[in-house]
Image (cartoon, rainbow, N blue to C red):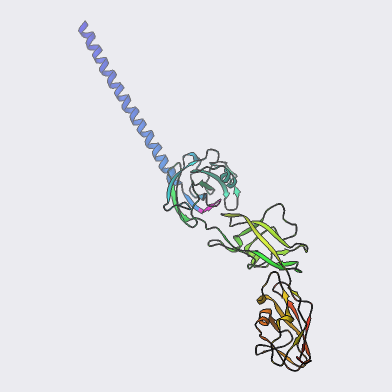
Amino acid sequence: METVLAAFIVIFVIVFAALSLSAAVISSQEALSVAQSQADARLAEQGRAALQVVETRTVANRTLVELTLRNTGSTRLADFAHWDVIIKSRGEHSSAPQIAYFRPHPALAPGARYEDARNMLAGSTWGAGLFEDALAGVPELAQPGILNSGEEVTLWARTAHVIDPGSAIEVGVATEHGTGLFTSFRANIPPVLVEHSVIVGRAQTQVTLGPAHWQATDEDDPADALVYEITGEDVRPGALSANSFTQADIGAGEVIYTRAIETDSETIFFSLTDDKDTLEGLAFTVTVNEPPVFAPETDTALLDDGEPIPLACFTVTDLDDGPEAITLTLTAPPDAGALYLASTPLNTGSTFTLMDVMAGALIFSGDAPDTFSFTVSDAYNPGSEAHTVRVLTPEG
């Protein structure tokens, strides 16, 4: 009896072990099948996911890399916390590029705007905003937080350094499905301010500003992308015809400065941007040029025929300009004789400079007595009052 019982127990153990092994094999097969199905699903989603680069650039004075992508696949993308962003860039004062992995900012992926990214992102972090049309600034409308097919996402990544202007940047992005892309571009080159001042005459109240007065250049942006913004709280109302304008507006003669008659000089503060780099704390200066003052020691020249007119008849003082910039315009030539600039005869409307007189190049030829008249001006102040010099012979 005991032998039969022992045999029964052995048979039971064997059967139970066989059943357990069979169940384990079935369970393993089911797990493998589930894993294979999940892998196939991921591969299918990966195959249906696709991203296309819309725009790449640096912004915020080359401290943010901005990358706009469009979902051109059929898979919806939403798990931004598991996106990978890697950027290779070179700092302004670095000799070699750096490769950095960027972590998503928990509050800015997605749902960010440029202002959020500029103000909140720390080094080596990124944020994202979803749009129907990113370049037009149209936000997504359906299913917020999900990048649907046809929608766009803009990534902003804060670098740990200021990127060198014009240097190469390489960006790699991988989504939660493993779909990735790689793109490269060059960092923005900021505008360069070339001219930012004007000189006006004492009586001048209005000037149409041109590139000779106000000009910036930019290697990678056109004139209509260079925007000036007048800043500061103490700007005199009406000083400029507009408080925001472009370099193209200046080139077209659409920016006018109006001076208050009592103003001797003026400083107008402004910023300049190409929408990617901004130069701030800049100053446009207005300087009033004082007119020349005619105060001759004598109005009479004692000359023989062919002698130069003495400088004493043309004593002019000018606080701003040298003798080469003082222009004398003949309004009434001599009646009987003639004036020559060296060997060139002068007529009504002819001009010569105070430097010519100092060099002895203004010659009177003819019989005295005689007279001639002229006005005195500089580049910014036109002459108005005519002055007369009498020519006599030494005997008379």
Q: Which residues are magenta?
A: 54-61
The image quadrant where one finds the N terminus is top left
Drawn side of residue 57 relative to residue 182, left or right? right
Is residue 70 rendered magenta in the image?
no
Residue 131: % across, % down: 57, 47
Residue 322: % across, % down: 66, 73
Is residue 55 rendered magenta in the image?
yes
Task: Residue at 70% x, 82% y: name it.
Answer: 351
Classify 144 as above or below 264: above
Residue 329: % across, % down: 73, 81
Can residue 94 be seen here? The reply is: yes
- Residue at the limit of the structure toward the left, as seen here: 3
Drawn side of residue 200 relative to residue 280, left or right? right
Drawn side of residue 98 relative to residue 151, left or right? left
Residue 319: % across, % down: 70, 69
- Residue at the limit of the structure toward the front, as seen here: 395
Place residue 367 in its image quadrant: bottom right
Q: Give 344 or 135, whichever is nearer the viewer.
A: 344
Q: Give 285 or 311, whichever is nearer the viewer.
A: 311
The image quadrant where one finds the C terminus is bottom right
Place residue 4 in its image quadrant: top left
Can residue 241 be seen here? The reply is: no
Q: Give 361 or 195, whichever is nearer the viewer.
A: 361
Q: How many marks?
A: 0
Question: Which secondary structure type mostly characterizes the magenta part of the structure?
Answer: strand
